[in-house]
Every structure is written in structure tokens, then in C-alpha cells.
Image (cartoon, helix red, strand yellow):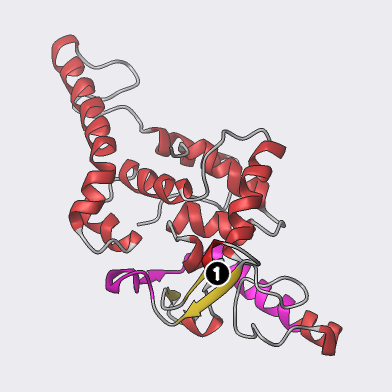
């Protein structure tokens, strides 16, 4: 399952100001895994070059399947290809810099009550406690139900990101690098059907134009506006600063 562009935009807007904001934004726009989102560290953000690197992850587990859920942090990603550097767009840059200042203020405000174990992590609450991967998984469905959004798994935000990239003309090879897949076949097997659907729609539009002539709104040999572009155009007309065109 994956969200269409309008659903992705609505989900991101609804998540603003909540504990799930970072998870939803980085999941839908960058296609990050839970472990990669929770593992984000300030040291991996370069605000001068406007890039950030996925180089640290945090996973959750139960010992022998029982007991309290524990976290395991490591300076290692799922595979070698998952350690990747991505561009930091202005919207995310502004939000992150504001969050960094907010965390600095909260450390000074709560003093000794502020948890020191996770200094340097991006995804912490007001007391410095790390937001755990299982929190994202359990709260995301509740968030969707609360706002009447179509049900998807949190991991499906990653698939939504891939779909949005494809709809905006990004090649399968570039999507492989963006998502950090180790093997091109993984990307192709997961998303080839989406690529084929878009290709079929484009072919149908061109065939229709060739047989029946162009319509008043669609120039010859030009496919109809894609759903992603329609959403972007609509958002631009409202003066929105959020666009789901990653590359």
C-alpha cells in the first residue's frame, strides 16, 4: 500500500507539531526506515552543504520474545548501500534548525531532569528521551484513525516515497540509491508495476492523441498532467512551501 500525492501531503500537514512529525516527514519524503529515523544524529547533518547522511540506526527487540522492549543502537546501517547521503531541502532544514534550538532550550530548562543518554540524537522528546521505533509503529495507526486517513503501515510511507519519485520522473536506479537498496532487482521487483502503470497511461494518452487528435487542454504528443504535478500545482497556487518533488 502507498499514499497518493494528495494523501501524502495531507498526512504531513496533519503530523505537524506532533511527536510523529519527524517520522512522517522523513518516511514520506525520504523513504527512511524506522531504525534510520530514530538513529538520526545531529553530527550527520551538514547545514552548510545542506546534506545529511544515514550512518546510525536504532532497532527495538525483546529478549527471547518476552519482557520489556529494549533498543539497540549501532553505527551501522541495514547494508552497505543503506549508508547514504541525501540532500536536505529548505523545508526540512528550517524545521531541524528550529528543533535544535528547541532542544537546547529544553536542556537548560529541565537541567538535571533532562536525560543525558541521548544527547546528540535528533528524535528525542522534551525530556531528552529517545523516541523508540516501536512508538512509531504503535502510534502511527492511531494517528491515521484519529484524522480519518486511509490505513497504511508506517513502512508503507517508504513505498509511498518510491511511488512519488516514480511519478515525478525519477529513474529506478536513482530510487535504488535514494532508498538505500543493496540490489537493483529489489527496487525493480517492488516498484516495476508502478513504473509500468505510468508508462501505460502515457502510451494510452499518446495513442488517443494520435488517433483522435489533441484536446483543447492537452497539446499533441504531451501526456496529461500527472496526479503528482496536479497536487504540486494546486499547492503552488495556494502559496504552500511544501512540494513532493524529491529529485
Near-viewer residue (141 or 198): 141
User: Which one is in front, 93 or 197?
Assistant: 197
| Nearer to the camera, 243 or 143 | 143
Image quadrant assignment for residue 30: bottom left
Using the image, determine if residue 61 lies above or below residue 162.
Answer: below
Q: Nearer the viewer, residue 241 or 181?
A: 181
Q: Position of residue 109 (x, y in %)?
A: 85, 83
93 drawn magenta: yes
- To which quarter of the image does residue 212 belong? top left
Q: Is residue 105 visible?
A: yes
Which residue matches tag 1? 63
Q: Residue at x 45, y 78 (%)?
A: 56
Q: Residue at x 41, y 51 (%)?
A: 245
Q: How many marks?
A: 1
Residue depicted at x 42% and y 80% = 49
**Quadrant position of residue 132:** bottom right
Q: Residues within 10 Å of mark 1 (few under 14, many from 20)?
A: few
User: Left or right: 34 with respect to 116?
Assistant: left
Q: Which residues are magenta?
A: 77-104
Per the picture, the main secondary structure of the magenta-coloured stretch is: helix
Q: Position of residue 221 (x, y in %)?
A: 18, 27
The N terminus: image quadrant: top left
Q: Quadrant of the C terminus?
A: bottom left
Amino acid at each position: 500500500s502507498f499514499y497518493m500525492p494528495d494523501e501524502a501531503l495531507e498526512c504531513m500537514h496533519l503530523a505537524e507539531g506532533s511527536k510523529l512529525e519527524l517520522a512522517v516527514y522523513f518516511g514520506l519524503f525520504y523513504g527512511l526506515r524506522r531504525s534510520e529515523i530514530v538513529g538520526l544524529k545531529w553530527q550527520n547533518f551538514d547545514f552548510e552543504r545542506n546534506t545529511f547522511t544515514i550512518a546510525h540506526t536504532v532497532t527495538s527487540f525483546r529478549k527471547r520474545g518476552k519482557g520489556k522492549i529494549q533498543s539497540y543502537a549501532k553505527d551501522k546501517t541495514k547494508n552497505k548501500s543503506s549508508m547514504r547521503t541525501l540532500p536536505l531541502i529548505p523545508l526540512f532544514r528550517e524545521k531541524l534548525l528550529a528543533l535544535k534550538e528547541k532542544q537546547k532550550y529544553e536542556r537548560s530548562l529541565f537541567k538535571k531532569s533532562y536525560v543525558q543518554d541521548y544527547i546528540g540524537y535528533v528524535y528525542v522528546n522534551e525530556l531528552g528521551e529517545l523516541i523508540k521505533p516501536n512508538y512509531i509503529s504503535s502510534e502511527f495507526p492511531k494517528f491515521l484513525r484519529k484524522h480519518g486517513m486511509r490505513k497504511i503501515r508506517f513502512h508503507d510511507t517508504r513505498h509511498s516515497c518510491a511511488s512519488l519519485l516514480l511519478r515525478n520522473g525519477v529513474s529506478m536506479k536513482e530510487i535504488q540509491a535514494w532508498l538505500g537498496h543493496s540490489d537493483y532487482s529489489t527496487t525493480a521487483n517492488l516498484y516495476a508495476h508502478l513504473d509500468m502503470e505510468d508508462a501505460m497511461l502515457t502510451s494510452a494518452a499518446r495513442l488517443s492523441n494520435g488517433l483522435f487528435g489533441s484536446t483543447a487542454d492537452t497539446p499533441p504528443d504531451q501526456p496529461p498532467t500527472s496526479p503528482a504535478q496536479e497536487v504540486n500545482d494546486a499547492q503552488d497556487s495556494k502559496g504552500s512551501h511544501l512540494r513532493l518533488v524529491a529529485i
